[in-house]
Amino acid sequence: MRIRIVDAFTDRPFTGNPAGVLLLGPDSFPDDSRLQQIAAELNLSETAFAHPLPPGGAADWALRWFTPATEVDMCGHATLATAHVLHTTGAASGTVRFAARCGVLTSTAHPDGSLTLDFPTAPLTPEATPAGLAAALGAEPVSVHATGPFTGDLLVELADEATVRALTPDLAALTAHSRRGVIATAAATGPGYDFVSRGFFPAVGIDEDPVTGSAHTALAPFWSARLGRDDLTGLQASARSGLVRTSLRGDRTLLTGDAVTVLDGELLVTL
């Protein structure tokens, strides 16, 4: 059984967001406990497990994602990484359909090597700033939005890009404020992107995620409404950094990015 580590939402190794990818046999997924053990061993923000489905159905592959601590309902960068492995190994071509907890997702490969994911747009619900959030985050929110069932995040708008970049939040305190995590964002001041973000997910075992594709299903409608354009580019300003190109299409959001395989190894235990 091969394990690949793929850096997603980047075209350069050791940047973007690394994901583990395991392509399994056609039967079914192993026990959840074994999948969780492998994800904990890799200790990446997510590890993706996929197996092929019978032809003629609504999807081509079944797909699940695990952090080192738990299974999650939706993950963008590990889906991009899985699609990258399928296309670069010749296991798939064109558009690939994935059956996941959040519904059927698709990935389309482009001649330049980039990939576009089709994900559900997060429904945004304005909320009053929860007591203690500003202290936990270390900055005063401009606005706060809940992001719906598949992510369970709080989207927190801050005053400017410099404030987002300077955050040093109290991660333990942040766990009280959302089911999955807190996404901090502001309009861009630098060239080459339209908005900036950082994502903190200590509740699922990830202190700061390098580049969060699923968060951009909320960032896309948020910033498209403010900037008056459906096609945007977001920079996630983690230490590794990465770019996500977003296209808002009503109840669907397209996420486009690059990926590069940095490790191809062998799992020496049975599943």
Image (cartoon, helix red, strand yellow):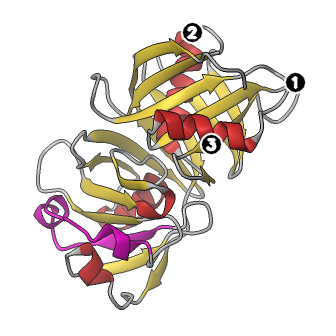
Residue type, label 2: Thr
Counting residues from the N terminus, which is met first, the one under dot 3 or under dot 2?
Answer: 3
Question: Most extreme residue toward the top, as rendered?
Answer: 90
Q: Label 1: which residue?
A: 54
Around disc 3, counting alpha carbons within 10 Å, would you say few (fewer than 14), some (14 to 19), or many (20 or more)?
some
Q: Label 3: which residue?
A: 36
Q: Nearer the viewer, residue 252 or 127?
A: 127
Query: Label 1, label 2: how many angstroms apart (C-alpha)?
Result: 20 Å
Counting residues from the N terminus, which is met first, the one under dot 1 or under dot 2?
Answer: 1
Q: Quadrant of the C terminus?
A: top right
Q: Position of residue 185 (x, y in %)?
A: 28, 64
Is residue 170 shown left or right of residue 108?
left
Q: Quadrant of residue 187?
A: bottom left
Q: Label 2: which residue?
A: 89
Q: Position of residue 247 (x, y in %)?
A: 45, 47
Highlighted range, magenta: 153-175
